[in-house]
Image (spheres, helix red, strand yellow):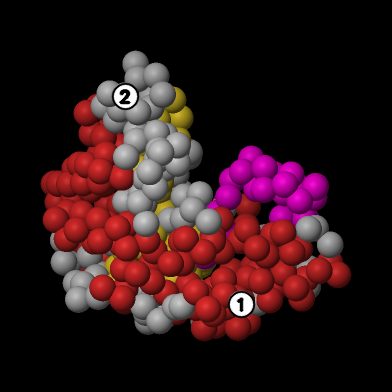
Amino acid sequence: MNKQALEAIAQAMVANGKGILAADESTGTIKKRFDTIDAESTEDSRRDYREMLFRTQDAMKEHISGVILFDETIRQKAADGTMLTQLITDAGSLPGIKVDGGAKDFANHAGEMITEGLDGLRERLAEYHGLGAKFAKWRAVINIAEGKPSAACLAANTHALARYAALCQEAEIVPIVEPEVIMDGSHSVERCYEVTTEALTQLYAQLAEQDVYLEGTILKPNMVVSGTQHAEQAGVQQVAEMTLDCFKKCVPEAVPGIVFLSGGQSDEDATAHLDAMNKIGGLPWKLSFSYGRALQAAPLKAWAGEASNVPNAQAAFAHRAKMNGLAAQGQWDASLEG
Ligand code: 13P
């Protein structure tokens, strides 16, 4: 394992005022996103959309340290024949790759999921490394409901995350470990705190047991928030305080950075929560973003599948990237949203 190389990549991923663009929607998920704007999802339309994002220079150069790609995208060329990974690299950003095979029904546990994709992963990582991937992502899904998550769900998912992380480091690829406690449900913010604490505790126990080098990893967690169906919704300050309280108990100081997923939060909530945490400050790790929807919802809507809308869509992406870049430094203010 080349610890120095891994550490340098991880540090670059959480450089000041920068975060990750999660553009790794599977073919099924991106189709759902395109359905909302009445755009057809084809290899070319997916390429056009993503090329538009990666060519947004003010966003990419100033605020996006890395981009998580899907298998199709890491092999794709821009309309002019340039590799999409080259566009990302030219903007001073790092290409990354989603390597999990998706969350599938967990046997004997109705309503729970297990992430697949370990078989053949060593060989796939070697290929992705050759295609320029500097980091990877693996997402585990943890649902909250009556009697859920089960002990088996947490054990199986955190074990798989650690096996994935070890294989990444062997291939000189920084693993983003993503245990996502899902927002959907009628649970309270306290219950989210409890489950997130348990998931992170088990994750770091597994990573330690499998000798994963924490300085060469990045954590991608949910924030501690109220279930979407819960009657009382925790406010921005409470979310920030409870999330940090949870992480201080569970996340070792050796971890260089934590980049949040947005998980269905509104664009502005995702920004406000990140900002509030960084305003509290005094933290051992960098705190930034790895947003999918909270970075892409605005440009996707502005684009609407029309080439003539590209400038507006790029402006919308640049704006969200800038807002989140400020939030990553605790320098955002609602008045900047305009
Ligand atoms: P969202 O920010 O839309 O939750 O996506 C981030 C991601 O990569 C989920 O795995």
The secondary element bearing badge 2 is classed as loop
The residue that disc 2 covers is 146
On screen, residue 129 above or below 30: below
The image quadrant where one finds the C terminus is: bottom right
The label nearer to you, 1 versus 2, is 1
The residue that disc 1 covers is 338
Mark sitting earlier along the chain (1/2) = 2
Q: Nearer the viewer, residue 333 or 31?
A: 333
Q: Describe residue 228's horizontal placement relative to residue 190 as left or right.
A: right
On screen, residue 141 above or below 225: above
At horizontal 68% and vertical 76% (from top left) the residue drawn is 315
Q: Describe residue 315's horizontal placement relative to residue 67 as left or right.
A: right
Query: What's the residue type where badge 1 is placed?
Result: Gly
Residue 123 shows up from this direction: no
Q: Nearer the viewer, residue 334 or 99?
A: 334
Judge: label 1 CB < 8 Å from ligand 1.
Answer: no
Q: Position of residue 102 (x, y in %)?
A: 48, 38
Q: Residue furthest front?
A: 232
On screen, residue 88 above or below 299: below
At horizontal 26% and vertical 27% (from top left) the residue drawn is 150
Mark 1–mark 2 CB contact (< 8 Å):
no
Q: Position of residue 77 (x, y in %)?
A: 70, 65
Q: Position of residue 322 (x, y in %)?
A: 53, 78
Q: Describe residue 269's horizontal placement relative to residue 28 as left or right.
A: left
Q: Which residues are magenta?
A: 21-48
The image quadrant where one finds the N terminus is: bottom left
Residue 44: name its quadrant: bottom right
